[in-house]
Image: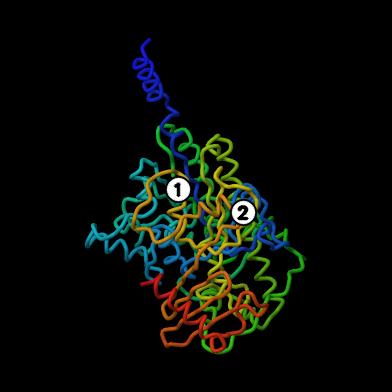
Amino acid sequence: MTVNKFIGACLLAAALNPLNAASEKKNILFLCVDDLRPELHSFGVDYIKSPNIDKLVAAGRAFDRHFVNSPSCGPSRFTMLTGRYGTAGNDAIFKRAERLRENPESVPPTMPEWFRKEGYTTVAIGKISHHPGGLGGSDWNDPDQVEIPDAWDKNLMPTGAWKHPRGSMHGLANGEIRSKNRGTMDVFQTVEGPDSIYPDGLITDEALTQLGQLAQQKEKPFFLAVGLIKPHLPFGAPKQYMDLYTGVDLPPIPHPGKPAGKTTWHGSGEFMGQYNRWGKDPRTDSDFATEVRRHYAACATYADAQIGRIIDKLKETGADQNTVIVLWGDHGWHLGEHSIWGKHALFEESLRSPLIIVDPAVIAPGTMSHSVVASIDIFPTLCDLTEIPKPDFLQGTSLLPQLKDPTAAGHAAVAYRGEAKTIRNATHRLTRHKSGEVELYDHTSSAAETKNIATDQPEIVEAMSKELSKILK
């Protein structure tokens, strides 16, 4: 056989090999968890039970100073999905869809669109964009109102007894849906039963089905995104998870006092106004505050159990050998710090969330990175890890250096809400208000975000203000 014929035969054999195309590109399993602060055992919170997420931390790279770009679901997910900064409202993704309809050439594609263009089968289950299932309308199930057009081959939201995605989003056990009458749904709950008595159990069941199908589809790689709702309010989880925290002593809430001066503090409207609290206020009732924290912990462990089921299925299919796994929390949540019970503030507790990446590219897996990074970095990172082209419109920075070296330097992280913007670097946080007032906090000091030192450090204020303006120009 001549050399040319031998090469031709090899190329033909490769083309006919059903594993060939998929094996050239890695799959992606993207796990989104709503309102998940780094309240995890592997992130140093000893009383939390999070064995499945802890295994991911041990197998990959966790970032304990990962920050989102906004302390709210919609704008945070916008940046994760687009690799670009956006508007501060929860309608950020729907506004992008409006711009797309008006002038398609002016709107860059989202991450799932980009991977779909590169030959991936893209499937979303649960809450990936702002609405679970990715649709608008009064019950979030109108097929004519798509949050991210052309992004997903399938965008699924099993609703079961909750009837529609809006019902599932704030659902309690066995189909209970939040009423439009404020304060009628309990703020926390625990009910005996299997995981499927709450919406995340159904989301996970569907994820297992889709994962099994995708793993059999050898001709194309897959991008599977699974979005869990808990520990979003209301804090409901099956009793077996709450039992893990019954009688457990919790550490004191750090800096629980309302901050002085101009800040982004708020009155915890979602927690205080949307749900039944039985007349109790965690800001003044320490026993009630402890119960709220225990129920949050139970929800985190319930979410962790769903993640374990998904990872087990991935391993069962054998696709784990060629899959990048990302676990991402869309923002943090105050459990009494700064006298806030909720998100929506430009403090560390609202903006810091877990980010974990598992891939063979990780050097020294299990070693935590303390570098400051941001959600805007996920899109370019996944391009690097899957070796597909990186679009030039991205505003983030690939985390490949930190995956190879946990001590590699990060970069400043910015965030915003309607009336203020903030920037966080390795040592300080600066927040600028539209009113002109400024907050500056020193994270090398034990006072951290309890003492505004802006008037004492004008040179740091000036330098960080310039950097903030440059990033968000």
* Image x and y of residue 440, in percent: 54, 81
- Left-right relation of 20 to 310: left
Q: Amino acid at mark 1?
A: Asp
Disc 2, SS: helix
Residue highlighted by disc 1: 384
Density class for disc 1 (Cα within 10 Å; few <14, some 14-19, many ≥20) is some
Tell me if residue 305 comes above or below residue 464 in the rendering: above
Q: Which quadrant of the figure contains the C terminus?
A: bottom left
Which residue is painted at 54% across and 53% down in the image? Answer: 327
Tell me the quarter of the image containing the N terminus: top left
Considering the numbered disc 1 on the image, is that residue within a helix, a strand or a loop? Answer: helix
User: Label 2: which residue?
Assistant: 304
Mark 2 or 1, nearer chain start: 2
Q: Is the residue 420 above or below the residue 49 in the image?
A: below
Left or right? Give the position of 182 relative to 86.
right
Residue 41 x %, y %: 68, 58
Frontmost of labels 2 and 1 is: 1
